[in-house]
Every structure is written in structure tokens, then in C-alpha cells.
Image (cartoon, grey):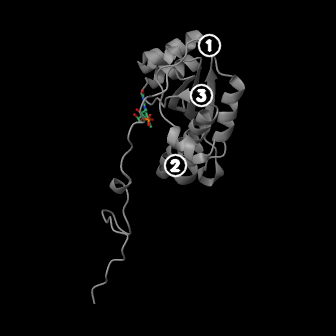
């Protein structure tokens, strides 16, 4: 699949086939793609936990208070320990750890689409419950949860995205014109 198609077809799915199970090797390849994301100072802060234990998936759905997660055959939990970037860059390091988690997770998501699989980026969950369940260390944050499966039905219409002209400025915040600003002489 070409890059434009993967980007434009990417969407969050909340209804999965309950009988079709993805090939776990494809999921590993998606995690492999996440390794290529940019990382501040080349320090990789992320870990990926692949869960296929049905009981654990049910508990993850409870911790996220989102029932659809329980239908997924796999859940990938992304977590990160920002201590290295914080040691190197101080307060900014916390921010960098979040940036690079986002970059890696988007790589992962796009690769999921390329394999014909579906997921939803889940950011709402009770972090302590997920940490207890998966024995995630104290110093490590849970960034997001990705339930993975085959989409139950194709969406009829693609949800409209925000217009480009609402997010694009030139040379200064708020300037929507590409034209060079005239200098006052
Ligand atoms: C940081 C973040 C947190 C999100 N948390 C949730 C969530 O907890 N549950 C959910 O169903 N969708 C969640 N989403 C998915 C968004 O609702 C979704 O991306 C948005 O509605 C746009 O739809 P699309 O991804 O299909 O284009 C989250 C997305 C992001 C980026």
C-alpha cells in the first residue's frame, strides 16, 4: 500500500470480527516499524506489550471502561520510561518522551492498516489498573492501548477531516496568506 493510501485510510475501528484472529507475526512487524520513529538523542524510551490472553483483554477493557476492546483478539499496550530523556534534557525530556511515543505509535498504526488489520488509539484508561495487570514497573508510563482485529464492517463514508486552511499559517501565527509581507519603509 502506498503511503498516501495508508495515511488517508487510517481510521479508528471499534467493532471487530469476533471469529477472525490476526496473525501475530504481522503485529510484531507493526511493532518493528515503530523502531524507525525519530527519538531525541537516539534514546528509545518505548516498550510494547502484546496481549492475547482473553481474560487479560477483558480486564484491559474494564480498565479503559470501553467494552469494544474486549472483542479484540490482540491488544498492544505501549508504555515508556522517560528517565533517560529526562536525565539528558531535564523538563523538556518528559515532553520529548511523549513526542517520540506519538511518532512511534503512528508508524505502528499505519503498518496495521497496511496489513489490512484495524485498531483504535485508546488513551482513556485507569493507568494503575493496567500497570497492576501487566506488571509494568513503577517508573514506566502507559501511553496508549491498541486493540487489534479485523474490522467488522467497512465505514460507509469517510469522516471529513479538518480543512487545511484552518491549520496552516505562513511566517507568523494567524497569517493565512502565502504572499510575502510588505516591509514598511
Ligand atoms: C491521544 C488519543 C486518545 C484517544 N483515546 C481514545 C479512547 O480512549 N477511546 C476511543 O474510542 N478513541 C480514542 N481515540 C481515537 C479518536 O477518537 C479518533 O482518532 C478520532 O475520533 C478521529 O477518528 P479517526 O482516528 O477514525 O480518524 C484517541 C485518539 C488519540 C490520538
Q: Badge 3 is on which residue?
A: 117
Ligand 1: quadrant of the figure: top left
- Marks 2 and 3, Cα distance to the nearest angstrom? 29 Å
**Image x and y of residue 102, in percent:** 52, 42
Instruction: Please identify the quarter of the rendering in which residue 57 is found.
Output: top right
The location of residue 149, given as percent across then percent down, is 57, 22
* Between 116 and 94, the one nearer to me in the picture: 116
Q: Quadrant of the N terminus?
A: top right
Q: Position of residue 28 (x, y in %)?
A: 69, 30
Q: Are marks 2 and 3 in contact (CB under 8 Å)?
A: no
Q: Nearer the viewer, mark 2 or mark 1?
A: 1
- Check the image and report above or below for 22 versus 169: above
Residue receiving disc 2: 96
- The quarter of the picture where residue 137 lies is top right
- Tell me which label, 2 or 1, sits earlier in the chain: 1
Dot 3 or dot 1, earlier in sequence: 1
Observer-nearest of 62 and 92: 62
Helix or strand or loop: what does disc 3 sit on? loop
Question: Which of 68 and 18 lies nearest the eye of the viewer?
Answer: 18
Question: Circles 3 and 1: CB distance less than 8 Å?
Answer: no
Q: Position of residue 3 (x, y in %)?
A: 60, 46
Residue under the image location 53 percent in, 28 percent down: 119
* Secondary element at tag 2: helix
Residue projecting furthest to the right = 25
Q: Name which residue lies at 62% across and 26% down.
A: 49
Question: Mark number for residue 53?
Answer: 1
How many angstroms separate mark 2 from mark 1 (CA)? 32 Å
Sequence order check, earlier mark of 2 and 3: 2
The verdict on label 3 being within 8 Å of ligand 1 is no
Amino acid at each position: 500500500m502506498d503511503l498516501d493510501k495508508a495515511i488517508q485510510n487510517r481510521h479508528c475501528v471499534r467493532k471487530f470480527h469476533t471469529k477472525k484472529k490476526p496473525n501475530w507475526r504481522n503485529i510484531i512487524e507493526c511493532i518493528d516499524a515503530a523502531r524507525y520513529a525519530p527519538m531525541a538523542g537516539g534514546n528509545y524510551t518505548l516498550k510494547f506489550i502484546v496481549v492475547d490472553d482473553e481474560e487479560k483483554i477483558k480486564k484491559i477493557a474494564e480498565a479503559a471502561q470501553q467494552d469494544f476492546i474486549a472483542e479484540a483478539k490482540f491488544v498492544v499496550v505501549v508504555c515508556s520510561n522517560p528517565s533517560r530523556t529526562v536525565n539528558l534534557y531535564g523538563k523538556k525530556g518528559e515532553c520529548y518522551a511523549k513526542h517520540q511515543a506519538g511518532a512511534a505509535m503512528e508508524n505502528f498504526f499505519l503498518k496495521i492498516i497496511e496489513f489490512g488489520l484495524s485498531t483504535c488509539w485508546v488513551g482513556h484508561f485507569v493507568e494503575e489498573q493496567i500497570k497492576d495487570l501487566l506488571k509494568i514497573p513503577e517508573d514506566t508510563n502507559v501511553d496508549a492501548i491498541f486493540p487489534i482485529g479485523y474490522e467488522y464492517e467497512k465505514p460507509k463514508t469517510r469522516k471529513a477531516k479538518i480543512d487545511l486552511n484552518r491549520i496552516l499559517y505562513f511566517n507568523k501565527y494567524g497569517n493565512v496568506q502565502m504572499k510575502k509581507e510588505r516591509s514598511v519603509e
